[in-house]
Image: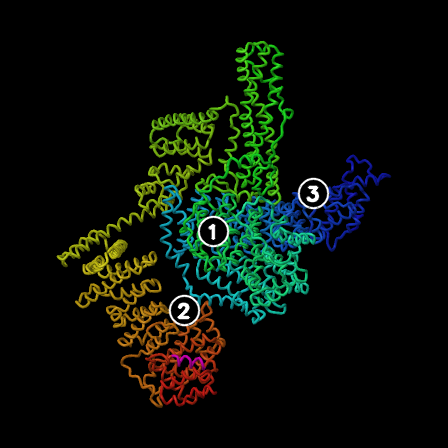
Amino acid sequence: MSTADIISNYAKQQRQTTAQPDGLNNAADSGDDKRQQSVLGVDDVAKAIAVIASNYGEEFKCDANSFAATINNYNSGISWEEVIYKLPYSNLHVKDESGAMFIIKVFLAATAGQNRPFPYSLMYEIWPDAPAQVSFLRNMLRSQAAAPYLLDKHMPTVTTDPLDLLYKVYQPEFTRILASPWNSLSLILVLSHLLDSKASDEARALLEAGIAQEPLLVTLALARLKIQHPRLQALLQHNVARFLKREFSHYGLFFELFRICERKMMLAFFCNIHRKDSSFSRYILDVLVDLGMANELLLVPKRDDIMMLDFIVEMAVFASRRGILVFDTWFPGLLTELGSDMLHASLEILHSKLQLEAARQRGEDKGIAAYSSAELTVMFKALGVVSMSPNNTANLKALYAQFVELTAELERTENERSIEEGQIEKEAESLFLRLYRGELSVEQMADTLEELRDSLRVFMRKTYAHVIQYPLEEFSFFDNYPEKELTITGQLVGTLIQRHMLSPASEPAILEMLVKALQSPTSSKSFNFGMTALQACLYRIEQLPVFCTTLYQIPVFQQHQQQNSTSAVKLVQSIINSAMPTRSAQTSAEQARLGATPDLMGNRLGVFGAGGIAETQQVFQSIVPPPLPELGEASAAPVEETRDKIQFAMNNLARNNLSEKMAEVDKVLQPKHFEWFSQDIVVNRASQEPNYHALYLQFVEALERPLLIKCILRETLSSIYRLLNAESTVNSSRDRSYLKNLGAWLGGMTLARDQPILRENVSFKDLLCEGYSCNRLIVAIPFVCKVLEQAARSTVFHPPNPWLMSIMGVLAELYATANLKLNLTFEIEVLCKALDLDVKAITPTAILGRAPARNAIDALATDLSKATVGADKAPLINTEAVQMPVITGADITVDIMGVLTQHASFHAAESVFSQPTMKKIFYMLTERMIREIIPIHVARSIYVAVSCTRDTIQKDFCGEPNEEHVHRAAQVMARGLAGALAVSLCRDQLKSQLYQTMRVFLIRHSLAEQTANSVAVGLVADNLDLACAIAEKEAIERASQQIDAVLNEAYVARKRTRERTGQPFYDLGQYGRLMYPAEFPEVLKVRLNGLQAGHLRIYEDFTQIPHFFSQIGNVNEEEELGVAQSLEQFVQIMGELERIIAAAGIDVTLSQLPAQHEACLYARDILVRAARVAQMDDAVLDMAQALVSSLYRAETRLGVDLYVLLLARVCEMSARVAREVTSWLAYADDARKYNVAATLALINEGLISAEDEDELLARQIDAGRAGAAEFASRLLRRAGRDAFSRTAQSLARATQGGQQAGYRQMLLSWTRVYEHPAAGDTELETLVQQLQQQVALKDTGVAAAFFRAGVEAAVAGFEGALPGTERGGFQVADALVRLVVCLARSGEGLQPARMFVSSVALVAVHMHATRPETFGAYQRVIFRLLVGLLNEAHTAHRSGDSALEGTEALLAETLLLLAPTHVPGLAFVWLQLAAHRYLLPQLVSSRAGWEQAASLLETQLRFIQPFVERGLVGEGVKLLYRGTVCVVLVVLHDYPEFLAAHALRLSDAVPVGCVQLRNLLLSAYPRAMRLPEPLTPNLKIDLLPEISQTPEIPYDHTAPLPQGLREELDKFMGTQKPEDFAASVLDRIRTEDAGYDVAAVNAFVLHALVRMAQADEGSAQEEAQRVVLDLLREVLDKADAEGRYLVANAVANQLRFPSAHTYLASRLVLALFAKSTEPVRECISRVLVERILVNRPFPWGLLVTLIELLRNPYYAFWTHDFTRASPQIADILAAVAKSVHPTEAAAAPPPAATQAQ
């Protein structure tokens, strides 16, 4: 279909539509063209375009140019913008990109040459058809060709404004997103609207596509729009979290833009994300550090940040672990800074963290602790010295008690692993091995290191530090590294720099290493390593200007730039070029250098900004550089060739080439160059490169030029002098850093080399005093500290050097009295640590306090006479100078004549001035007098008022970002002061002059002198105030204009900063110079978050200044009277209300009263008066206090309901009152609150929460508060237990505690009777019967509580016993054991003993968990209790008493519960009890006790196993091991049958390296068996009768096997399927850490032998042996070295006494040796030989098998290579052969022969 056809069809359709209904002729006539033009209007063309675009595709196409030309021919004046905007109403539904592009092409063709932009905003309007709009948006955004026409120029998400603020590495991506169609706030806004339409699914899909394509733009747009759509808010938070976790690319650019656009929102998002998931904390801190916001947030907290203090403290904790700050000093400083505002937040933080830790220790939360014990201790210590309310003090004590309970487990968590250096090194090496093997990527390795760095576990943090140190230690070996590993190491180092993962101490060393690497030859591996690392840290390079400049100065690096322009090289080149000064600037800088007073710092790359150091008054006069030494010739700069040689040598200087470079410089450096060289090394190197100070000093000393050293010292002092006195140093952290570097350089040149700093050059004490008096300690203290730090390297100037200690005394005085900021106190503390001093132990001086104010009056007069007030302290904002105005009488702007005409008064002389002529003369005389007098006074008042206002506003409002607040305060203060001063200055002169003028005038008009005097006095009294008012008005109007002119730049700076950056403006220069006396109240100090309402009110009070004496007095009397009257009326109404409530009755409720009841009317009257009272907060707070008191006194339901309702409404009137009332109701410790009805009413009204009341009441019950338990009981009866669960639990504990006390008292009574000499069995039996009547011991719960109380009393008795007392405090313990025996004999049976030992175990476990430090002292009483019962049971057995039958088994069960693996503190007591002569022999003497005896021995072995395997064998472990060996030896000797039956089970628990202990277990054999001599010649083991007997295995030997492996092995023995069974066995017996399950390996081999032994004689047995042999051989071949050793060890374990298993195992060993590979033979030999190398005994089967292996020539043992691998092995094998049989030694080759071979 052609364009003409479409238009024709539309024309016909329109003609038909517009046909007249009466049938008039509508045929076309000669005016057809005109009609056609009228038909094709905007709507028609829009519909035509909609049809084409909606159907555009392969089958339907239309040429846009032809279409546009045709439409223009029909209607040349059509508005194409209107056509486009009509499309949404023309049934447009675009199906693909070509249809969308057709619309754009038509518009462009139709408006060709007119430079009209495409009206893209049609996409962002609300269409009637939502699905059509989504389809149009989707296809438009998909089309690459359409992108240039869709740029939103009206509402872009990001504009070009931040371009100059971004690092260059971000600029390419930022430039790209500027041209993206998704850079539109309108687009996101319309999509948010479409989410609630019928096309919500399509809109959501389009939004998700936008996030996938442009996550940065979409997320930033959602943040800027602040759309309160739940789905979009969730999406925004989700996206920010993904950016934090680096799941999106360009996350650094996103947060830079987020900070610029929405800084407050970004911090709020961070805070919310942290509160929802604390695992994001380390990611958030990474971002804050990268943006440079960490110091601002942590070191300069604002009161506006009080609501997110938990977040700030969390950031500080992680920053402390990274070395960014010291939490020990930061938190107390913050507490001091914020005062009471910090208290509640700190308590809440402690409460939440302790709850989290308690949940973790209970197992409810599997995570790790949030804060370490040291961090929590810091918080508690800081809070402990702060004064707080009794309620907060009680809360703090409760929290500290909870902290003490949790400390032991928390510290165990922090130190759960060994922190030995060897173990840490192994852990670090394993990480690198996994990295190099490809198991970890570089990013995963960095993530792992981040977790280690931020962990509270000491082991993990030390491992991280070791990993960071690894590249530095290995750098010298990098040339020997393989390419792959070196590349990975470079990527890792670059990633660590990129992510800010290096501490402030380690990052300079890493950067220095990279510089050295890049200084290597370009073909070297070290250079490639450096380039790889540099490529991986592109986003950090620009943040390291010194590093970047150093790179640029490397000649080899510049060559590499020319050859291979990598992205890192291009970036460095771009950074340097953008910061490089122009040629003319360099020339002028060179000239300045060579002048008499060179500006050394101003010519360097961005050191102090464009202007260098500002010329200011020299504040620091205590530093005087020495004169330039006599060089013998004029100073001059070297020629270019010489300069290049020197610069090249200095740039490539290193310790390994020091002599070489020194020789190069020494050849060309002449004395006339010394000054130039000094400037270069001081300004360009020492001030920027503190890490190279030592190298540069060595270089200078090596030159051996004394004059050069003097020149360098002079240049150093000159540069320090300029920096100290520069305003830029006060305001710039960069310049202060340079000053500190020069301080360290000065100290290194002098003090570190035992050279003094002459007082005539630097007087450090005077310098500190000057800094204190001029408010410049911010530059003085860090400089002095850096100089003195070098004294630590001196042998002369270290403490207690008097010169040093006198300066330290001044620093101590500043530390104690100057109220320093955190960073300055930190500098002093660091200095003291370096000098090994305690700042609190240093005696402070008193020179600061003695310094008087010098000539204060003269100084004030001088200041007032200057044109610029305060010029010696130029602020950050260059405010307009205050000029003394010059005013003449003609300049007065007030219409004096008009004022006098209207307001002059003649009451005292009406008769004299009754004529108009007299009045006119009076007006003229008065006007002339006023114009003569007031100008000078008005000028002075304006000057003083504006000067004072300017200085005060600059100081008070340096932290106020709102220019309106500054303007308002400046205006009211200047106007108020100027008016008052003008009145004060001119009043007396006006009074005198007006009196004289009127007196002379009246006398001249014939009035008597006396009459004239009295009339003149009356005229003055009537009109003096009017004249003063004229002066005041003139002063106010002029002062208002002048203060605005003076502070105009301050207003503009605040507005400009907010509009351009979105950040608040702070005058940090002014803020940094503020100083306060030592005892200055915190509330009055200036903060960087604006003035509070109370401070602003001071300025508002300037409007209340009385200007005339007639107006002085009672200024606020009316207001105060209103408050007093209101409170008086309130008291009266409350009295009436209480009377009405008392008369209403007890059961009357508020809902039963009519609306017009007296009580309701009085209540309404109270609220009305409260709303109208002046100073609402104070008055309403008094009313609220009265209502609370009446509420708790109320005895009727009506009173409670009415007072609670009034209290709630009063709280709604004032936020302050609501806060105070809620705080008191929730946390006040007041017995009046124990009112059930009032409490429930307050909860129902929402004034207090049930949760807070529940928690508070539970704490009070636990603390034993009087009346709390009774109140809780009544409250629970009314409200139920569900709402107050914690209170119910505490009440139950309190009740139980009372029972426990009763039980303890009973036991103490029993002890006294038991200890009495006259007490016999009869008395004890009687007392037991009485006890059974009082306590229901048959009830299990009661019995458990009784015996636990008894055990605790025994422990308490032991604890309270005095040293050396009789029986050592065991009286209660012995009496308790005797009570258990008596109860058993009274018919209770073994039940009392069972409850007793259970209680002992329970108390022991509890004490071990809660008191681990002192638990060792209580082992004796626990041992006494258990061994006492054991002794009693043994005595009963011997006497034939069966009452305690089964006690041994009961004690064995208890010991298994108290296993050392569970309670390691009982390890020695446990072994002593388990091996007791009354316990272990009783168990093993009967087969019924074998299982328990074996379990006890196995438990002991498993406790020792991890210590031995990890190499943690201390003295305690050695002692336990020797004791265990002794016990096994005794059992082997006395009960060999038991040990032979359980030897294999016990050997599973023996550590692999404990060969002798394993031999002891495997050497056991039945007592009745006689072992054949293993050395018997031609011993035939298969002929022994015992070979046919299977050894006893009284336990399930297959239990350690993985599930299903036994069945698979049984099936394989029969079918030999599957074929890969051996490989699957290895996989099944592996552990999660890639090791092997030793017990499973042993069980697998044992079960294979059992199946072989179970096979029938003959071929079946041979087949079974063949299958097992092939299986084991395949397993050994496929296993690694560890697996091979464990399988061979398992087979060797079966070589015991003569039996079927020993015979089969021996055959297997020999067959495997004969038929396996060389590694398997070597492994078998190792296993057999190492068991012979230890002390005897040896298992019989082992000896027989080894002898056969050595003797039988079939195995050719001595011919294998491993027997000759080294002389040491040959010696060992020869010794083994000799120990087995002397004849075998002859068969073994001699060591010498072995060595020769």
Q: How far apart are marks 2 and 1 (CA)?
A: 42 Å
**The stretch drawn in magenta includes residue 1724:** yes
Residue 249 visible (yes or no): no
Q: Tell me which amino acid carries mark 1.
A: Phe
Where are the magenta residues, as a range? Answer: 1721-1730
Vertical arrangement, residue 1153 with respect to residue 52, above or below: above
Please rate how many residues cluster around mark 3, counting C-alpha atoms within 10 Å: few if below 14, some from 14 to 19, many from 20.
Answer: some
Q: Distance between the residues labelled 3 and 1?
A: 70 Å
In the rendered structure, are the residues bearing label 3 and label 1 in contact, judged by CB atoms less than 8 Å apart?
no
Which of 1374 and 1603 lies nearest the eye of the viewer?
A: 1374
In the rendered structure, are the residues bearing label 2 and label 1 in contact, judged by CB atoms less than 8 Å apart?
no
Horizontally, residue 1407 falls left or right of residue 1770, namely left
Label 3 or label 1, whichever lies nearer to me, is: 1
**SS of the residue under disc 1:** helix
Label 3 or label 2, whichever lies nearer to me, is: 2
| Percent of width and height locating residue 587 | 68, 53
Q: Tell me which amino acid carries mark 3.
A: Tyr
Q: How far apart are marks 3 and 2 (CA)?
A: 79 Å
Which of 324 and 1356 lies nearest the eye of the viewer?
A: 324
Disc ID at residue 89:
3
**SS of the residue under disc 3:** helix
- The residue at which mark 1 appears reads as 826
- Whichever of labels 3 and 1 marks the residue nearer the N terminus, that label is 3
Q: Tell me which amino acid carries mark 2.
A: Arg
Please rate how many residues cluster around mark 2, counting C-alpha atoms within 10 Å: few if below 14, some from 14 to 19, many from 20.
Answer: few
Please rate how many residues cluster around mark 1, counting C-alpha atoms within 10 Å: few if below 14, some from 14 to 19, many from 20.
Answer: some
- The residue at which mark 2 appears reads as 1510
Which of 757 and 156 lies nearest the eye of the viewer?
A: 757
| Percent of width and height locating residue 1470 | 30, 65
**The stretch drawn in magenta includes residue 33:** no
